[in-house]
Structure formats: structure tokens, C-alpha cells
Image: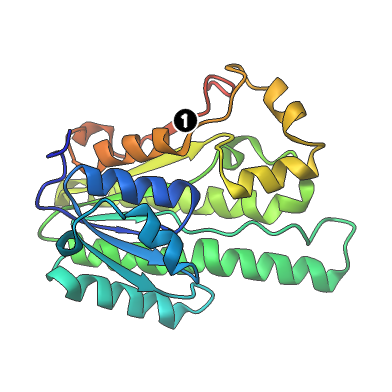
Amino acid sequence: MTDLLDGKTVLVTGASKGIGAAIARAAGAAGARVIAHYGSDRAGAEAALAAVPEARKTFLGADLHDLAAAERLWDAAEAWQGRIDVFVNNAAIMLWTGGVDDTDEAWDAAWAETLQVNVLASARLMRRAVKHFRGRGGVLVTISSWAAQRGSTNPDTMAYAASKAAVKAATQTIARAYARQGILAYVVAPGVVRTQMSEAFAATQGGEEGITAGLAMGEWVPPDDIGELVAFLASGRARHLTGATLDVNGATYVR
């Protein structure tokens, strides 16, 4: 499907590693012009798009702890080609502090930082996407998590689970409110994906062996599975799937 996204400009946040890198790579392979956002790891974003011709890629750094930086990111992304057709809302952090038994200061800090990056900055960018898509149509894909539906097995990551539920609800609201204006919005909810974040999480739960033993397929989700799915959603070919939450967890969590 090398021509699936021909002529489309796709903005992917958090494109330097893991799921974001896989999405950027798949979009580029499908013919898109890709705007790869990164926080500090430009080299990772460049590696993800190494096979994409120079004319079809650009790299934008922005610290999403700063709402003004999120706004500047959108401005720069839109200016590159004059329009954005697809926004993939992927960037997120997971902190290992702020558990119930931590200090009030640690709890408040973890919640504040997590919500700042995963919800407030994401919401700013989703808002910009809706404003940009009105009158011309567009696609929003938010990467949530199965933790948004089932909670997290590590209570220290409660804020992360809550943040993923928040962006899921925001995306569904956009889907319902703007469907008649040609704006399609999807939620992808991965399970255990082979990323640095999941590997770090597994370490808090006794290691990979125990995590893997609880998976129906007995294996972690490859990031490229998410990338290929998002590339298809970005094409807009499944219009009436808008508003859906797509679970990608190898049948471990079936709703």
C-alpha cells in the first residue's frame, strides 16, 4: 500500500521512538509527507524516517511541557506544506513516582506533569487540528492505552492511566461533534507493545517473563502493527469507523 497516503501531510507527535516512530515510518512508506515531532531525540526521529525521501519529511522539536511550545509546533507544522491532513496524537510520558504512599509533593508533581504533557498539550493540539480541519475535513488518531479502560496494574502509574482515559474521551467527543464536518477521529488502545516504555513498566511488575505469561498470544505487540493500523486509519477509507476505540492487544483484553 505504498500509495495509501499519497498527497497527504501527516503530523506525528512523539515520533522519535516506539509507537510514534513506527507510525511515522508506516506513514512515510505509504507515501505521506511526514512531520515528525520529537522532544529531544531528533536522531531517533531521523532514523524512523531514514527511508523517506527528503522532500517528504521534516522534523520539529517541541517540549510539550510547555503549552506555548505545543502551539508553535502546530504553527510550524502547518506552515511546512500549508495544510495538515492527519494528526496522530501520540506523544506521552509515564512517570514512576507519585504513588499512593509517596509524599503529597511527589503525588502532586507526578499528576501535574503527566496531565500537562499527556492531556493539556495534547488537547491544545487536538483543538488546533479541529479548527484546521473544519471546512476541509481531516483525520485525528489518538494513541490511548488499554489502561484507559482497565486501569493500570501498577498504582504508581495511576496518573498515566487517567491521562489516557482523558484523551480517549476528548477524541470521542470530537468524533461525535464534528462528524458532519468531515472530521474523522479514532482511538487506538494498545496493550503491551515492544517499546522502551513497556519494558520499563514490566521491570516494575517483576520482569518481562511474568508479563508475557499473562498475554493470550504469549508475545508483545510489535510497534509496526500499530504503525500499519494508523496508516490505514489516516487514509480515511474507514469513514464510519470514526469514534471507535480499536484494541490492539492480541486478544488479552477483549471487550
Percent across and percent down for residue 191 are 56, 34
Question: Which three-letter amino acid code belongs to the residue tagged 1?
Answer: Asp
| Direction from residue 102 to residue 124 in the image, left or right | left
Q: Quadrant of residue 76?
A: bottom left
SS of the residue under disc 1:
strand
Instruction: Tell me the residue at 42%/51% (across/down).
Output: 20
Eyeballing the image, is 157 above or below 226? Answer: below
Instruction: Tell me the residue at 60%/49% (across/down).
Output: 196
Percent across and percent down for residue 209 are 75, 27
Instruction: Tell me the residue at 40%/32% (across/down).
Output: 225
Residue 204 visible somewhere in the drawing: yes
Q: Residues within 10 Å of mark 1 (few under 14, many from 20)?
A: some
Residue 13 visible somewhere in the drawing: no
Eyeballing the image, is 175 above or below 82? Answer: above
Percent across and percent down for residue 26 are 30, 43
| Direction from residue 132 to residue 68 in the image, left or right | right
Eyeballing the image, is 165 above or below 192? Answer: below
Quarter containing the N terminus: top left
Which residue is more in the foreground, 15 or 154? 15
Q: Quadrant of residue 226?
A: top left
Percent across and percent down for residue 230 are 32, 40
Disc tally is: 1
Give the residue number, with chain letter if any, for mark 1.
Answer: 247
